[in-house]
Each structure stands twice: as structure tokens, then as C-alpha cells.
Amino acid sequence: MLKGRLLVLTPRFPYPSIGGDRIRILHLCRALSREFELTLLSLCETREEMHMEPHDGLFKHIWRVRLPRWRSYLNTLCAVPGSRPLQLAYYESAAFRERVEILLPYHDAVVAHLIRTGQYLLNAEVPRVLEMTDAISMNYQRMRETKGYRSWKKLVYRVEQERLQRYESAVVRCFDRVWLTSHADRRFVDPAEECEIDVIPNGTDLELLPFRPPADDANTIVFIGNMVSAQNQDACVYFIRNVLPLVRAKAPVTFRIVGNAPEAMRRRFAKYEGVELTGRLEQIFEGVNGAFCGVCPVRAAAGIQNKILEYFALGLPCITSPLGLGGVEARPEREVLLYHDAEEAAAQVLRLYNNRELRISLAQAGRELVVRRYDWKNIYRSFVDSCLMAAADHAQWRATGDRGISSAA
């Protein structure tokens, strides 16, 4: 039986799989490869990406278009006086648009990763799926409202947030199917629930995340995250300044940041006592030895925080802000511990540090949750079924001529 042909558009080359967005798109493509023959068309920022050859055999064909950073910056600068989202301007490429138009007729359907590439499909005549992941405008709104967060990016959020929210609410009406990771994001972009949006959460690769409950003498607090992210940077600064001193006043603990950390971030955090950074690791579990809990003190976010799923899979009891818990379906005091201010966060950390039975109970319950609900292998079918439904919906629309939606601004 011949497979259908599916075109996948990505705004960044998805290899190597660093960061939640690349991990999700590659898992999504592995799922869809069961039903479709895949073609990848990706924007590339560097010459290295233009020549990098993946060895997983996931894509039948790979096409690339170079979009250097200087060009993206110029595109963005030119868009500032108008009303177009800067996200779209940054990833605008005439060569990419031309390649999309050439490839579309040879494919039975297309999946766009994020609105950054979704903008190239508003007039496409094949079944279209928009993998939004999360509502970027909700994330930006929360960053704007975060007290104590100081960065030039806050000005960008102020300019961009309202533009993005208008665009996201309109563009979800222009696709046969839209994928988001949480119901909160869906309600934000489509409050009336009028659009064909499927909530498909992120998952975990349990084979790469071995279950290792905390040792009795563990004394390290772990934060897993890519420190390029402004949200992760803010979360760590908040924890180090407001929570860690309260904990260290009563227990000899260390705070370890596990994940990609640019040199500027290393220098920034080196001045804090009791803080260490691992940098990028080939396997996450290499960085959590000696840890008795993982924390998710994010103050601005959307979608699902992968770090919480990783804590659960690894057997690390998790302490998180309510906003950090987001779309993860975990129960407070059963699989996770919540806090609402710095004092409560410190109390929860010390509670775990001093209570071995609680650590083991949370570790076991968290692992059971990800096995049951967030194993990537169990999520794959949702992507396939939704994509097939998009094709069916598109065929019906072609037959009736009525999609019942308007174009995005």
C-alpha cells in the first residue's frame, strides 16, 4: 500500500534536537511517518545547517532555504511601524515561499510548524495542519506582566503581544486542523471553541529517562532547561534571589541548572553562591545525580513545561508554580507540590529535603503518570488520526465550498 505524501514546513532546521520545539516536531514527524512519506522544507539560519545531514532516515526528501540572521533582523525592523506580527516578518523569505508553491502540488497534505511557517499556507489548496504548540501571545502577555523582569525583550513583548493575539485568533480559522499542547492555550486563542483545534500534549521518551528516585543523602535542587529562553532565565533568577537563600539558611543544598547554557549565562550565574551549571549534556539523566527534587519556578509560560514531565520520568519530586504546572494533568500533593510565593516555595523544598517517604511517594506517582499519560509512543496515534481527519475535512470543504472561516489578517 502506497503511503500518502506529506510536506512538513519548519522555521528552523530541526537537527540537532535541542529544545522543546525541535523535540516535539521530530516526534510528531516520527508519528506521521507511519502513514505518510515525509518531505521536509526548512529555513536555515547558518551555513552549517544548510549542509547538516541527519541520519535517522525520517524524511524522504529534505529541502532547505537560507535565511541569515541579518536578513531576519532587517525584516523585523521594517515591520515595526505596521501591524504585522514581528514573528512573521522575522521568518519572511521570498525564496521559501516560492519553494512552498513548487512542492505543494506534489503532496497530499502539509503540516506547518508554528505560525512562522503557517503564514505561507493561507491560500494553499491541500489539507493544511498548523502545529502551533502553544499560544505565543499568551506567553508574551505573561512576560509583560511579570514583575521584576528586566530585559530589552520586554519592549518587544509590549510591541508584539497584541499583534500576535489578533493574528493567532484569526489564523486558527484558516486551517483544517490546529494542534496545541494544552486546553489553556486553546481557550486563549479560541474562547468560543469554534475552530478545529486538537489538544495533543507533549510527551517523554521513557527509554532515555531512567527512573532513579532520590538517594537518602541527596542535597541538590535541579532545574532542567535551555538557558537561551527568556522564561527560563527569569525563572532561575527568581529562584536564586528569592527562594534559594531561604533554603540554604536551613539546609546545605546546591542549585544546579541542567541544560544548554551560553557563556554569557554561565558568567551571569557564576556570581551566585551555591549555584552550578552543567551546560549541554548528551543525556539529561547525567546531570541529575545527587538531586532530591526538580523545580519549575517559571513566572511566564504557555503550553506544557517539558521539564516537569522529565522530572516525573526521572523520579525527581517536582515543586512548581501554578503557572508552571500549566497543561500538565498532575494532582497537587499526589504527583506534584505547588507554591504561591517564595516563602512557600522554600518551605516545600525543605519539606522534601527532610522527608524521605514523601520524596519516594511523589517520585513513584509522577513516574506512573508519565507512563500512563505522557509516553510519546502513546501520543503518536493522536497526530496521525488528526491529520487524517484534516484530509477528510478538507475534502468535505472542497465538495461544499463552505469552510465557514475567514482569512487571517
Image (cartoon, helix red, strand yellow):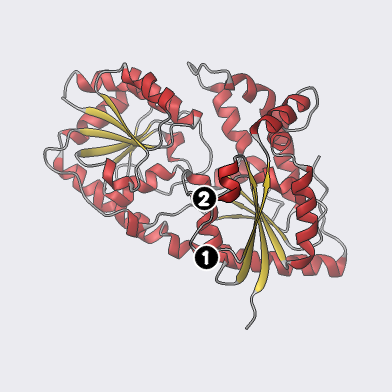
Q: Is residue 341 visible?
A: no
Q: Residue at x 25, y 18 (%)?
A: 273
Q: Is residue 335 above or below residue 388?
A: above
Of the residues under marks 1 and 2, which one precedes in the sequence? Answer: 2
Residue 63 placed where, x, y %? 66, 56
Residue tagged by mark 2?
15
Left or right: where 45 falls relative to 364: right
Q: Residue at x 20, y 27 (%)?
A: 253
What is the secondary structure assignment of the residue under circle 1?
A: loop
Name the amino acid type tagged 2: Tyr
Residue tagged by mark 1?
57
Distance, label 1 to label 2, CA atoms, is 13 Å
Q: Which quarter of the image is occupied by the C terminus? A: top right
Left or right: where 12 falls relative to 229: right
Q: Which quarter of the image is occupied by the N terminus? A: bottom right
Q: Is residue 83 above or below residue 397?
A: above
Name the amino acid type tagged 1: Gly
Residue 387 placed where, x, y %? 64, 64
